[in-house]
Amino acid sequence: MYRTHTCGELRIENVGDEIVLSGWVQKIRNLGGMTFIDLRDRYGITQLAFDENANPEMTAKAREVGREFVIQVKGKVIERSNKNPNLSTGDIEIACHEINILSKSEIPPFTIEEDTDGGDELRMKYRYLDLRRPQLQRQMALRHKVAQQVRAYLNNQNFFEVETPVLIKSTPEGARDFVVPSRMNPGQFYALPQSPQVFKQLLMVSGYDRYYQIVKCFRDEDLRADRQPEFTQIDCEMAFVEQDDVLSTFEDMTKAIFKNVLNVDMDTPFKRIPFSEAMAKYGNDKPDLRFGMEIHKMNDLVKGHDFVVFDSAEYIGGICAEGLSEYSRKELDKLTKWVQRPQIGAKGLVYVKYNEDGTFKSSVDKFYDADQLKKWADGFNAKPGDLILILAGDEKITLHGLSELRLEMGSRLGLRDKKTFVPLWVVDFPLVEWDEESQRFYAMHHPFTAPKPEDINMLDSDPGKIRANAYDLVINGVEIGGGSVRIFDQDVQAKMFKILGFTKEEAENQFGFLMNAFKYGAPPHAGIAFGFDRLVSIIAGLDSIRDVIAFPKNNSGRDVMIDSPSPVSEDQLDELMLQLKEEEKE
Amino acid sequence: MYRTHTCGELRIENVGDEIVLSGWVQKIRNLGGMTFIDLRDRYGITQLAFDENANPEMTAKAREVGREFVIQVKGKVIERSNKNPNLSTGDIEIACHEINILSKSEIPPFTIEEDTDGGDELRMKYRYLDLRRPQLQRQMALRHKVAQQVRAYLNNQNFFEVETPVLIKSTPEGARDFVVPSRMNPGQFYALPQSPQVFKQLLMVSGYDRYYQIVKCFRDEDLRADRQPEFTQIDCEMAFVEQDDVLSTFEDMTKAIFKNVLNVDMDTPFKRIPFSEAMAKYGNDKPDLRFGMEIHKMNDLVKGHDFVVFDSAEYIGGICAEGLSEYSRKELDKLTKWVQRPQIGAKGLVYVKYNEDGTFKSSVDKFYDADQLKKWADGFNAKPGDLILILAGDEKITLHGLSELRLEMGSRLGLRDKKTFVPLWVVDFPLVEWDEESQRFYAMHHPFTAPKPEDINMLDSDPGKIRANAYDLVINGVEIGGGSVRIFDQDVQAKMFKILGFTKEEAENQFGFLMNAFKYGAPPHAGIAFGFDRLVSIIAGLDSIRDVIAFPKNNSGRDVMIDSPSPVSEDQLDELMLQLKEEEKE
């Protein structure tokens, strides 16, 4: 038996017990005739004491071990003279009478501590050592806990967990599909799913009523800072429901998770904001509502005063940063440069300081007098001491700039506390988006998303104006989940394909088996998918999903620990009837 | 609102309630002025009644619907005059006053009933309709339930669910790996895991202590009757444990599953049989212990009586089929042909009838007298009325034949009831197997499997004799799970690689990152993996895993519903820097 207890288990009640512990050596201290070792496992740390006088041979052996050695000790639980209140086992220590080295360790390439000296690259390469660090252990434990909470909630709501296939079919539009050559079917390929969308809809047609799965999905695309080629979704679908049923089911799930995992209370129903309102007030379809600082459109207030920047702008709008009227020239210059970066692309930044003494100081004093600036300030409900920041230009670019500026000022004002969670539903997304380049509409969500019944009359006349029964769950400015009510009426679906520019053949080719299934009695249905990695990372208070994934890939999609992807042998390619394409010949 | 209740919910207590139901039309009957519809959903069937006198228009509409239409009805719950005790809702019916057709259905290609008229191929193509059939609904519900039981048990035992990557690295020996070309790393490939073996061992090195995952695994190989290219494992690993800890943890899990899902009691500890005993007594390393009928080796009894078949045989053995002494000449001839099929490959079959009157009749009467046959019978503890069946020849082939014969006779005697479950552990597998063809040893389990400590001294002298700390869980003759204690000592591991004929470079190349990880303090660890599909199918009383998988592939690895795998476009191949190899030119 390697242990009678874990390293996080022993308490003052155990004093006198003969025990066996196993674990990793966290720290060794030699103090005169005594040697102390902190022994670590997943459950905690226990202090081991070796007395040279009592047992010189054993103590000599204890002094030989180094950090990260795996050892087993036998001994008696004794009360500590200097207790450590920061440790759950801090009241006791082990008076050891035997030590066995189970496994030695070389000196690790970085310290296995809360704050390590290892850089990102090194820690990715030695991920198995990084995973020993307490914060990664906490994050993996959290991920485990969230997964169990999700399942407990959905099981309780009569959802069935059904596994959908990983080896599926590549679609012509599946530019981001990973494909998998089949040895048994040479020249043919499976694809890995970007989501189980079609299968979960089929399950509704099959009468499974409520489906969920915590499932890996795959996307072969350039990885932005916080994407992974394989990621995990909480994927759900319900039959015989309307939008409100889905929203209430999943806000209750979210509430339950935050309550049971973080003991954070969320009020339900969550706030619901139409897409159009989110864009107007926050410049963004996933607004961070931990703070207000709403965007105000100022076109009517500011036009016609000979300020050509405003007069010529499609859109003028601003935000009010509370209490920042003392911002210096230098700080404002820096902020101007910040909004002029290509990521934001504003031409410039107009400010209005509402000074503490009630006067105004602005960068457009030449064009607007104090009365006019007062009117602007009133529009923001600004108080003396506030700072109004204004951008102007193309509407889309300017709203994006204001959104970024709002988030930046929110951060500077400390309004984005990671322990505060403000959820909301963004609803009524547009059904389709017009793409100037290809001169066609694209589905904003996917081609099966149902239009709002009250907008359905515009299907022929004005599809760009139709709102969809689609919804996103947003927490603290992060999109956590999204879904929609699905079309289950074959006529509406046919119209939708027409709007999206599919010929009948293309639709048949791409979605034939789903369309066929719909011929045999499709129930009304709706669903949602949560980004599980992102949900866990926001609960963990992290900005990146990488550290809630045990073995993540880097920004080039590489696993540097196992050195993958990697070349395969000619033999293997031969069997798959494949060959590498040679570099283009000049 | 599409429904106030499900179709399995209403009871006599609901009589008088105004309700709304939605579901599929199972059956329509027109009886004079009344029309009855059986409305079906996942939860059950409710009878709807439409009274032509009360509402001719509605009843006309009800008569328009066909099987598998999706309808919604509003009505009042009334007590049925002729109750149906076979239906949970059989005490009531719905007096409808409104019917809405939500979705029409064409006539399904086969009947959606417990016993369908659809053949295998057709049902695979229309899997979404087959999945509506009650038995598939039960099987999916069962699979869901088993998964939740597994998680509940393991969560309770402090196991963490940790997701391991699906896009991993192909190994030189990974002939059965599916590979996945990477667009971002042209010419390079990921591989899909045949199991998360290495990652779970890394998690032990990382200190996660107890890991599990219900996870998809992949194997690109010729599919025998009951294999799938993607299949699901319950994958587990534990640190600081010995073999007995693993066995007791997972027999308790198995016991809990059978109790909570089927209300079947299993006694623990499960029977444990060494591999050598399983082979000797049952000719098989996964014996079906629902019945005895042990194989007896008869070499000593039968040799030296001038019967050349026995005298020249390496192995002579038999079984005793109780009560079958009346088998006719014709039946025995058929059985002889059965053992002579190439799958079994016996040269012939010797029988001894122990007649009810105490006399003997055998096919070798010429060589053995009644006294000798009585001795044989005593060896089997045979009684008058029993039939002894004997095979002789090469030991391996003969034991295999006896194993098959034993199972066949068990079936004929009704000793293999699908509702009886007899679990056992087969332990002490050989560590390595000698392969005549390549003149080298292969790992019986995998190269990380630990030898039994008491056999470790034979590592250099006689590796073929070493027994491993490896174990299989067998239920009713089906291997449900298997695992081993792992090597965590670098010296033993190095020896093991040497025995398996790996050069240092090859070992480094193939298992380098795991070997590296072991340099930094590896705990003793052990694990197991269960075939989840197989576990569910045995609980369901099925012979095939296919019908416990929602969307299975056929024997060619094809999903005939979605028609996958399929060719991909030239553009897609170009982006992956791949081209199809042309057929060999003559």
Image (cartoon, coloured by chain):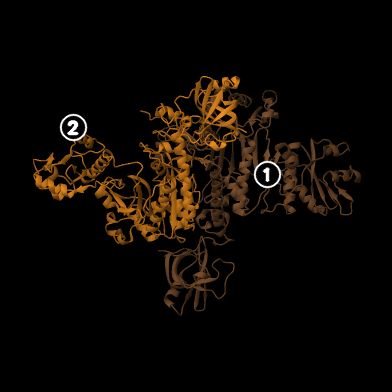
Chain colours: A orange, B brown
Q: Quadrant of the N terminus of chain A?
A: top right
Q: In this rendered view, identify the residue nearer to me: A199 or A47.
A: A47
Say left or right for B487 vs B361.
left
Image: A292 above or below A111: below
- Chain of the residue that carries numbered disc 1 in the rendered image: B
Are discs 2 and 1 located on one and the same chain?
no
Residue B312 visible in rendering: yes
Picture quadrant of residue B446: top right
Residue type highlighted by circle 1: Phe
Residue A330, which numbered label? 2
Residue B270, which numbered label? 1
Residue type highlighted by circle 2: Lys
Marks 2 and 1 sit apart, C-alpha to C-alpha, by 78 Å
Say left or right for A304 vs B353.
left
Q: In this rendered view, identify the residue nearer to me: B502 or A269.
A: A269
Q: Dot 2 lies on which element?
A: helix
Coordinates of residue B432 in the picture (x, y in percent) = 66, 31
Q: Quadrant of the C terminus of chain A?
A: top left
Residue B510 visible in rendering: no
- Count up the numbered dots: 2
Furthest residue toward bottom:
B53
Q: Dot 1 lies on which element?
A: loop
Image: A19 above or below B86: above
Q: Quick one: label 2, few (<14), some, or many (20+) residues within 10 Å? A: few
Coordinates of residue B167 in the picture (x, y in percent) = 47, 37
Coordinates of residue B58 in the picture (x, y in percent) = 43, 74
- Chain of the residue that carries numbered disc 2 in the rendered image: A
